[in-house]
Image: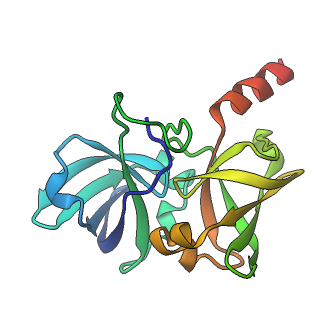
Amino acid sequence: MFTGIIEAFGKVVTLEREMENLHITLESSLSKELKIDQSLAHNGVCLTVVKIVENNYTVTAIKETLDKSNLNELKVGDLVNLERAMKMNARLDGHIVQGHVDQVGHCTAVEFNEGSWGYTFEYAPEQNNITIEKGSITVNGVSLTVVNSGKYTFSVAIIPYTYEHTNFKALKVGSKINLEFDLIGKYIAKLNRM
């Protein structure tokens, strides 16, 4: 379980395909603190550390993960948002995040607003996911508050700190993003469909 508060970047060093799996090796300031078998969120996707060598570590994404996230789009040199699993005795600064991407969306607008940035995203309706204004959403692993909510679209406002310390600064119109919708909202949406 995670909080959506990004701790560091990982820089993609190598991408190695093995059958339908993708082994992703990243360089990060967190590498020396990691352990084999540890869960770590990558752009909001919970992956297991399988190898550590100095400042680099490797995780493996299987076909299911690649099909439901933007990890298949990674290129060497890309920056990935990283968060270690939350400690049970720590403050919950973001919101409850499972590290299970619900679907991929894409950026439809980026706007600079005299000191902050506004991002608008759109997602496909097939899964009946919902957002609400002032509700929580996770975009590439970042816990955010929904500013505007529409049918299969929503906007968020990004402060300068978040812009500089996450990969939001690399997002542009058309960028694919990982979305994890609010856990409570998912249960309510499912109950309404029953």
182, above or below 152, in the image: above
Q: Quadrant of the N terminus?
A: top left
* Image coords of residue 100 (percent x, y): 52, 41
Q: Residue at x 55, y 79 (%)?
A: 170
Q: Residue at x 20, y 60 (%)?
A: 31
Residue in the foreground of this view, choosing between 90 and 146: 90
- Residue most extreme to the left: 54
* Image coords of residue 87 (percent x, y): 33, 34
Left/right of residue 84 with respect to residue 69 in the rendered view = left
37, above or below 186, in the image: below
* Image coords of residue 90 (percent x, y): 37, 34
* Image coords of residue 86 (percent x, y): 37, 38
Residue in the foreground of this view, choosing between 76 and 54: 54
Q: Residue at x 50, y 37 (%)?
A: 98
Residue in the foreground of this view, choosing between 54 and 76: 54
Res. 180 image quadrant: top right
105, above or below 127, in the image: below
Q: Quadrant of the C terminus?
A: top right
